[in-house]
Image: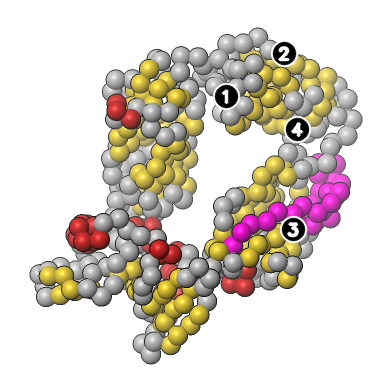
């Protein structure tokens, strides 16, 4: 008997909903789409090839809410560094999966000729899992991510095995020493100060490398490396106006630099705001604002949102703005009226204090481009609330027909 062939299959959306186009495909009566995801995927690919993004589809698409999670094993879809890249000991490797994952066995394997050295995953969150490369002989580096290293956050299904073969192997650099570096921050805050070094090339850290400051060692897990920059956050409180020696130990270079604790703490400045990518209207995001000095939220009336100069609603009822160390966090749902515009987020200076209980000297503002709705969470919620929906996303809007009566709704 015929059944509705699912169209535009997207593994990232299978946990909440599925898209399909009306098509006749022969199958036995005991085959159920919800019970045979592998068959669905195979049939779809044979008939349609690569799944397309929603914005690429100039046709009506259906979204159904499933009664139970689909147990499709997560699969590695992207690895950073990419295949055949040059790597060094302690480089961070990021595995991106095609569905949200949680910790599984938490173990991957790397090696020169065969992947036989066990490495633990540092963290697993959302679509990514990360680990650091151990020290290996110069030459090819292969990788094996065993089945079950992570599990599906939706169904608990074990991930599929993934291998980086010798053909695509990384190349371990024999030069694991630091590039030539100079101190970029001769004056730091007395508490939670950031010490930065600017280097003349990409920084690679041997496993035993550490920086010693004020009788404390900062190992590779404490050192923040970004291409040609090396930094760390001072753990202990320094004496105002005093000088300290920052010394590299076991890093393959002899480098010492004098760091002075400021007579007063410099005003904190914003280092980065996440998420950094374009946003979708109707989606909820976890924002993290990282400063170069410690900050504390002293008022919940801290944020302002606007779209092309028009003020937008603030945080949802019950949502709060929190601070810990250098980071301020909040959750925000981008309203539909911000679609196809620029979202401006302003952190009020008087709502934030530094380590000396001083307000920021000015407001902190950053912007993000917002695209029209039809993001994954938006469509999943729409499908759950309205039943089966026919949705078509154009460059300007998302048009849906939902419910038994097929009432048209434009978003």
- Residue under pointer 4: 193
Let me know if residue 8 is in the magenta part.
Answer: no
Q: Residue 345's x, y, as percent?
A: 70, 59
Is label 4 or label 3 in front?
3
Question: Reading the chain from its start, which is encountered first: label 4 or label 1?
Answer: 4
Q: Quarter-wise, where is residue 307 in the image?
A: bottom right
- Residue under pointer 1: 202
- Residue under pointer 3: 346
Q: Do the numbered discs 3 and 1 sit on residues whose CB atoms are within 8 Å?
A: no
Q: Residue furthest bottom?
A: 405
Dot 3 falls on a residue whose secondary structure is strand
Q: CA distance from mark 2 to mark 1?
A: 19 Å
Dot 2 falls on a residue whose secondary structure is strand
Question: Reading the chain from its start, which is encountered first: label 3 or label 2?
Answer: 2
Q: Residues within 10 Å of mark 4 (few under 14, many from 20)?
A: many
Whether residue 346 sits left or right of residue 285 in the image: it is right
Is label 4 or label 2 in front?
2
Whether residue 228 sits left or right of residue 22 in the image: it is right
Q: Would residue 56 be visible to someone looking at this image?
A: yes
Q: Residue 94's x, y, as percent?
A: 45, 38
Dot 1 falls on a residue whose secondary structure is loop
- Between 60 and 264, the one lying in front of the other is 60
- Determine which of the numbered discs, if any, sits on residue 256 in the image: 2
Is label 4 or label 1 in front?
1
Is label 3 or label 1 in front?
1
Residue extent of the magenta highlight: 347-370
Q: CA distance from mark 4 to mark 3?
A: 25 Å
- Between 37 and 140, the one lying in front of the other is 140
Q: Quarter-wise, where is residue 107 in the image?
A: top left
Question: Reading the chain from its start, which is encountered first: label 2 or label 1?
Answer: 1
């Amino acid at each position: 008997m015929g059944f509705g062939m699912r169209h535009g299959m997207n593994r990232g959306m299978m946990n909440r909903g599925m898209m399909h186009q009306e098509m006749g495909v022969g199958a036995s009566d005991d085959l159920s789409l919800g019970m045979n995801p592998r068959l669905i995927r195979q049939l779809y690919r044979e008939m349609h090839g690569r799944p397309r993004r929603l914005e690429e589809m100039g046709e009506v698409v259906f979204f159904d809410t499933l009664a139970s999670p689909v147990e499709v094993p997560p699969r590695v879809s992207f690895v950073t560094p990419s295949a055949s890249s040059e790597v060094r000991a302690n480089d961070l490797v990021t595995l991106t999966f095609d569905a949200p994952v949680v910790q599984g066995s938490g173990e991957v394997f790397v090696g020169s000729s065969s992947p036989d050295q066990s490495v633990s995953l540092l963290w697993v969150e959302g679509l990514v899992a990360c680990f650091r490369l151990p020290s290996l002989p110069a030459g090819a580096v292969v990788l094996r991510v065993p089945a079950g290293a992570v599990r599906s956050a939706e169904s608990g299904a074990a991930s599929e095995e993934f291998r980086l073969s010798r053909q695509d192997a990384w190349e371990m650099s024999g030069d694991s020493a630091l590039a030539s570096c100079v101190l970029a921050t001769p004056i730091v805050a007395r508490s939670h100060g950031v010490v930065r070094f600017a280097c003349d090339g990409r920084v690679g850290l041997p496993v035993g490398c550490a920086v010693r400051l004020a009788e404390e060692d900062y190992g590779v897990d404490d050192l923040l490396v970004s291409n040609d920059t090396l930094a760390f956050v001072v753990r202990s409180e320094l004496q105002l106006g005093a000088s300290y020696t920052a010394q590299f130990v076991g890093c393959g270079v002899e480098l010492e630099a004098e760091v002075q604790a400021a007579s007063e703490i410099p005003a904190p400045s914003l280092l980065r705001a996440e998420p950094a990518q374009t946003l979708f209207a109707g989606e909820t995001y976890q924002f993290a604002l990282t400063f170069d000095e410690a900050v504390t939220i002293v008022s919940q009336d801290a944020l302002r949102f606007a779209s092309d100069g028009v003020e937008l609603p603030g945080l949802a009822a019950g949502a709060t703005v929190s601070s810990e160390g250098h980071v301020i966090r909040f959750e925000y749902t981008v309203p539909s009226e911000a679609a196809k515009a620029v979202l401006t987020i302003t952190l009020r200076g008087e709502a934030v204090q530094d380590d000396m209980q001083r307000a920021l000297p000015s407001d902190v503002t950053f912007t993000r481009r917002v695209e029209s709705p039809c993001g994954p969470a938006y469509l999943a919620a729409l499908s759950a609330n309205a039943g089966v929906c026919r949705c078509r996303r154009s460059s300007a809007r998302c048009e849906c027909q939902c419910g038994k009566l097929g009432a048209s709704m434009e978003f």
